[in-house]
Amino acid sequence: MNHLVVQLTRATLFVTAALFPIVNPLGSALIFLSLTRGYPHVVRRNLVNRITMNSFLLLVISILIGTHVLDFFGISVPVVQVAGGLVVFTMGWTLLQNKEREPRPQAIGVEEAEAQAFYPLTLPLTVGPGSISVAITLGANTQRHAYGWPVMLASAVLGPLLVAFSVYVCYRSAERVERWLGNVGMSVFLRLSSFIVICIGAQIVWNGVSALVQKLP
């Protein structure tokens, strides 16, 4: 029993350590704040709940059946990286080019805001193509042979659960950080974050292109 617990702990930490730096909830939190600027507190809170659940489900599905879905459509992971990296690059470029906007009207409804919960706030902002490709790789690697299917399945749920919880904590704390940074600090951070998002998108595209080139005869 103790041996099984040790295996489950190691497998869960392995999944969490692989996903956390790619998901990067700390860096995404303030970008989420800028995209929901002027939203009432209750609307942001509902969005955070939806984003957390969406992120958890997306990561679990990517780990468990991601390779099967790609195989069904005849899509390789490098192609997902190229296409997803272009989406991330475009989002970062759009954020970088946006001028300072006035806060959105407080009358925005929950349903209108929740329409953005999956795209773009969950995908690609929180769980982007980089996270999905890592999750698919985790599901396809030899971890199940090292630990067995029960531990692999449990870690495929517990790892994303820990990552999703970190997203929840960071996104819920974003408003406090906004008050601490102020308007000027938020503007500077948004520009820097937008440039970093562009670089991340370019890196994901490069990883995909490099993998595709290596497969050429």
Image (cartoon, rainbow, N blue to C red):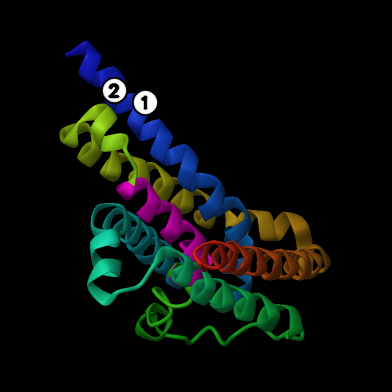
Looking at the rendered structure, the number of numbered marks drawn on it comes to: 2
* Residue displayed at 74% across by 78% down: 96
169 versus 29 height, above or below:
above
Q: Amino acid at mark 1?
A: Arg
Q: Position of residue 44 (x, y in %)?
A: 47, 68
Amino acid found under the numbered disc labelled 2: Gln
Does the image show residue 41?
Answer: no
Q: Position of residue 147 (x, y in %)?
A: 25, 28
Q: Which residues are magenta?
A: 123-140
Task: Identify whether 100 is placed above or below 88.
Answer: below
For the point 46% across and 62% down, which residue is it?
127
Whether residue 137 is in magenta: the answer is: yes
Do the numbered discs 1 and 2 sit on residues whose CB atoms are within 8 Å?
Answer: yes
User: Which residue position holds label 2?
Assistant: 7
With 192 as the anchor, is 129 left or right in this view?
left
Query: Which residue bears the numbered disc 1?
Result: 10
Among the 4 quarters of the image, the one containing residue 152 = top left
Give residue 11's position: percent from left, percent from top.
Answer: 34, 31
In the image, residue 78 above or below residue 89 = above
Please tell me the numbered disc located at residue 163: none
Residue closest to the eye, 204 or 32: 204
Residue at the image position 29 percent from the left and 61 percent from the top: 66
Instruction: Answer few, some or many: residues within 10 Å of disc 1's Cα (few below 14, many 20 plus, some between 14 and 19).
Output: some
Looking at the image, residue 178 lies above or below residue 26: below
Secondary structure mostly seen in magenta is helix
Mark 1 and mark 2: Cα distance apart in space: 5 Å
**Foreground: 151 or 77?**
77
Residue at 33% of width from left, 25% of height from top?
Answer: 9
Q: Secondary structure at mark 2?
A: helix
